[in-house]
Amino acid sequence: MWAATRAKSGQSRATRRAMEATGLAVLLLAQLTDALPGRFDWQRGAGLHGGCGECRPERCPVGGPPCPAGRVRDTCGCCWECGNGEGQLCDSDPSSARFYGRCGEGLRCRSLPRRDPPGLAGVSPQARCACTRQELLCGSDGKTYDNSCQLRAARYSQDKEVKLTVEHRGPCTAKPIIATPPRDVITLDGSDIIFGCEVSSYPMAVIEWRKEGNSIFLPADDSNMAVQAQGGPRRFELTGWLQIQKVRRVDEGVYTCTAKNKFGEVSASARLQVVEKGEPSVSMTDSDRCLYRPLHLNESESERGVPRNFVEQRYGDSALGFVLERKVH
């Protein structure tokens, strides 16, 4: 038993010595690395900075994945690699720090206002790639791009290169597109409701509202109806609202939003159903049919041009009209 205990003690001492030796080796290696003229970039795998040898193009990688932002020279200025795309982090001064990489073709690295979290001042990156030329372009796919960098990146959508060219400078001209159509509404008698309709087009469209069975544009002479339109929420978009205050049974029906410009028109409809107080509960199976409750707008929403007596509705990227309430069974 004494011999076994002694052997076990010897093994423990040997293990402890091995761990001490390993720790010493790691410390020496770290000191040696710090003493080198460059540092190893573990994220990009670029090797030792400042230690570029003779350029051997025949050793550069051949082929590789497509580069939506184009190709740039590597940190040693020898081989080609994919450049960073619009909005990606970049090295504002590659000569002193090479960590995130260089921006692609037609892009430059621009510093951003510093917003460091507490205790990390000077640590967070402050530069991203931005397209050098901001000019609206109409692509051959009928879509408008903010700049040539976005159009070039779109060529590599869905991991494959597509044939996409510049149709002309400026936004694409076409008939309107309804980005967010109005939604069916089920509400109580006497409530205020609103239909919203978001339209994308260039030239800008005109939005009109009609009720099924009536050829007159709303609000006509109805004192409980109001129509309003406002630009946004995105570029080349227009949002229209139809508000009906203190709805009655007679207001039930299908309401249509029509958007038109000189290239054509498009429309979308939604149904209003009014439930009188005291009636049996309503069963809704269509996910687009919602029960809404009023909500007062705050100062910022009022400043956007939405009247204070409107209520708020959230659908898509918009916050207009109402807040979605739970379904009633």
Image: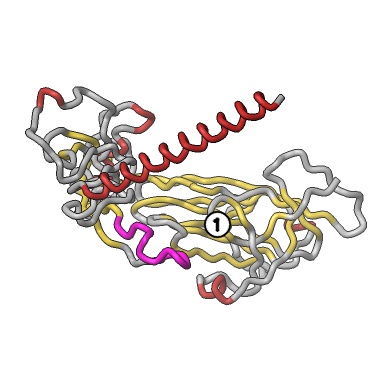
- The structure residue drawn at horizontal position 70% and vertical position 41%, both measured from the top left corner, is 287
Above or below, comparing residue 7 to residue 177 in the picture:
above
Which stretch appears magenta?
115-127
Front position in the image: 238 or 263: 238
Instruction: From the image, tell me which residue sits under label 1.
Output: 318
Q: Is residue 36 visible?
A: yes
137 lies left or right of 287: left
- The structure residue drawn at horizontal position 76% and vertical position 64%, both measured from the top left corner, is 191
Query: Residue flagged by tag 1: what amino acid is it?
Result: Ser
Q: Whole-percent x and y of residue 39?
A: 25, 46
Q: Whole-percent x and y of residue 121?
A: 39, 66
Q: Is residue 138 visible?
A: no
- Quadrant in which the N terminus appears: top right
Above or below, comparing residue 37 to residue 251 in the picture:
above
Front position in the image: 257 or 18: 18
- Quadrant in which the C terminus appears: top right
249 lies left or right of 261: right
Front position in the image: 154 or 280: 154
Asked if the stretch drawn in magenta spans residue 44, the answer is no
Majority SS type along the magenta span: loop
Q: Can you tell which quarter of the image residue 152 is in? A: top left
Q: Residues within 10 Å of mark 1 (few under 14, many from 20)?
A: some
Q: How is the image coloured?
A: secondary structure
Asked if the stretch drawn in magenta spans residue 121, the answer is yes
- Badge 1 element: strand
Above or below, comparing residue 168 to residue 226 in the picture:
above
Q: Residue furthest front?
A: 2
- The structure residue drawn at horizontal position 34% and vertical position 57%, both measured from the top left corner, is 125
Q: Can you tell which quarter of the image residue 56 is in? A: top left
Q: Can you tell which quarter of the image residue 53 is in? A: top left
Q: Whole-percent x and y of residue 248?
A: 78, 61
- The structure residue drawn at horizontal position 21% and vertical position 35%, both measured from the top left corner, is 81
